[in-house]
Image (cartoon, rainbow, N blue to C red):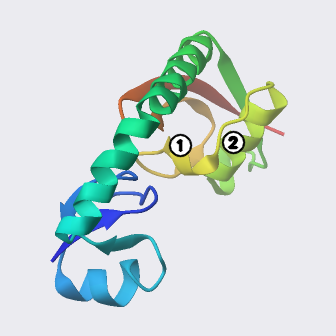
Amino acid sequence: MEIILKEDVINLGYKGDILKVKSGYGRNFLIPTKKAILATESAKKMLSEDLKQRAHKLERIKNESLELAEKLKSITLTVGAKTSTTGKIFGAVGPIQIAEAFEKAGFAVDRKVIVLKEPIKEVGTYSTTLKLHKEVTVEVAFEVVAE
């Protein structure tokens, strides 16, 4: 089944992408939740016209993402977590805690763009990838410390 995404879907694609997905996924999830529409000929023509009109806006968004990426490369975050005496974290540090640390540092970063390879369960220095735009990713270092 061929669909056109109406919004960004994590691990699938970005708004305006034409993708092939399994029929059940498209029919039972993407289309009813209004995340996608069927890729008919008329829908493809409307998409191409819409992309022409949005090209300038998309370029501006990409440039803003690039500027933010340059600023984020130079900072080092500190994330506090409750720990035991051996340095093990109670629970884990995830994207929510990292997004809160960005907010305290003065950067508005959505937790959905933060990609962790695995949950962080010990105190130490780590790095994470931020997918700010479909063409802009940045590695950011952060340190997990005991509170």
**What secondary structure is found at the residue carrying circle 1?**
strand
- Cα separation between marks 2 and 1: 8 Å
- Horizontal arrangement in the rendering, residue 102 relative to residue 4 (left or right): right
The N terminus appears in which quarter of the rendering? Answer: bottom left
Q: Going 19% across and 85% down the picture, which residue do you hit?
A: 23
Identify the image quadrant of the C terminus.
Answer: top right
Q: Could you tell me the amino acid type at mark 1? A: Ile
Left or right for 4, reference 23: right
Could you tell whether 7 is left or right of 21 in the image? Answer: right
- Residue toward you, 124 or 21: 21
Q: What residue is at 72 percent from the left and 34 percent from the top?
A: 108
Asked if the residue under mark 1 is in contact with the one under mark 2, i.e. CB atoms within 8 Å, the reply is yes
Q: Which residue is mark 1?
A: 114
Q: Secondary structure at mark 2?
A: helix
Locate residue 29, reporting x and y percent. 39, 84
Would you place residue 52 above or below residue 140 in this image? Answer: below
